[in-house]
Amino acid sequence: MKRNDWILIAVLTLIPAILLTGNIIAAQKIASPCLVITVDGSTFGIYDLNEDRIIDINGKNTCTIKDGEASMTYADCPGQNCVHSAAIGKEGGSIVCLPNRVILKIENAAVTAERPDAVTG
Amino acid sequence: MSAKRIAYLGLLLALAVLFGYVESLIPVNLAIPGIKLGLANIVIVAVLYIFTWKEALAVSVLRVVIIGFMFGNLFSIAFGLSGTVLSVISMALLKHSGHFGIVGVSAFGGVMHNIGQLAAAALIVEGFPFLWYLPILMLAGLLAGILIGAVSLPVMKRLPRINDF
C-alpha cells in the first residue's frame, strides 16, 4: 500500500467521524418538550414539564404540572371541559379552555416520524 | 474489441452477477439496511485494472441491470445504478491520477458507492434522514472497499492479463 492510500483512508475515516459527532451534538441540542400556555392568541408563558408547579392564569384558570404532565385543575367557567381533559405529557397534545381562550400545548413533543423506514434496498 | 476480449468480459460479468447471488445467500443481518461486503466489486476492480474504466463501467452497469431484473425491481436498479456509476467513475479518476494503490482506489470506490445510493434514496424517499445515514454508510463503504481492494490484489495476479489475448 502506498503512503497516499493510508492518507486517503485516514481522511475517509475522519469525515464520517466528524459528521457522526455533529449529528449526535445536533440531536442533543433539539429542545426537550415543554408546555406553552397561550391566552387569547398571545403567549402567556413557557414552562418546563420536569418541574412540578401550579400556574395561575389570570385568576380564571389554574394549570398544574406534576410528574411530567400538565393538566387544568381549575376553571371559572360553567362547562369545565378543560378540567376534565386528560393530562398532556411529552408525547404532545393540548388542552383548550374555550370560554377563557386559554390553550395549553406541548411544544417539541417527542417526535417519532423522523425514524428511518426500511424502504432502501 | 476482439472476440476473446468480449468472451473474457462476458465471463467476468457472469462472475460478478453470481457473486451478488452468492452474497445474498449469506445471512448477515445488520441493523442498518444497505451495509454489505459487495463481493461483486472484486470483479469490477479487477476489470478496471485489467481493462479500462469503460469496460469496468459496462460490466458494473450490466450487472446491476441483470440482477435487478432477476431478483429486484426498478427501485433496486435505480439505487444500484447511482451507486455503481459514481463508484466506478471515482475509482477510475483516482486510478488515473496515479497517486494511489489498488486498496486506496477500492476504498474510495466503496465510500462513493454508498454515497451514490444514499443520494438516490434521498431523492426518491421523502423525508429520508440523509445526514444520519451518511457517516455510517461511509464507514461501512470504506471498510468494505479496503477488504475488496486487499482481496483484489492477489486475485489480479492470478487472472490472465489483457496483453495475453
Image (cartoon, grey):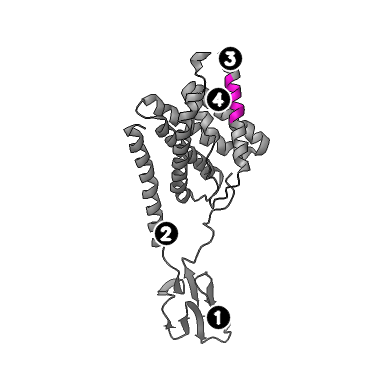
Residue A72 point in image, percent of width and height = 51, 82
Q: Label 1's element?
A: helix
The N terminus of chain A sits in image quarter: top left
Task: Give the amino acid at mark 1.
Answer: Cys
Residue closest to the eye, B129 or A71: B129
Q: Earlier in the sequence, mark 3 or mark 4?
A: 3
Say which chain tag 2 marks.
A
Where are the magenta residues, as a range? B8-15
- Local secondary structure at mark 3: helix
Instruction: Judge the density around disc 2: few (<14), some (14-19), many (≥20) Cα neighbours within 10 Å.
Output: few
Query: Which numbered disc covers residue B58?
Result: 4
What mark, if any, has residue A82 been given in the picture?
A: 1
Name the amino acid, label 4: Ala
Q: Depth-wise, is mark 3 or mark 1 nearer the camera?
A: 3
Report whether B133 appears left or right of B97. Answer: right
| Same chain letter for marks 4 and 1 | no
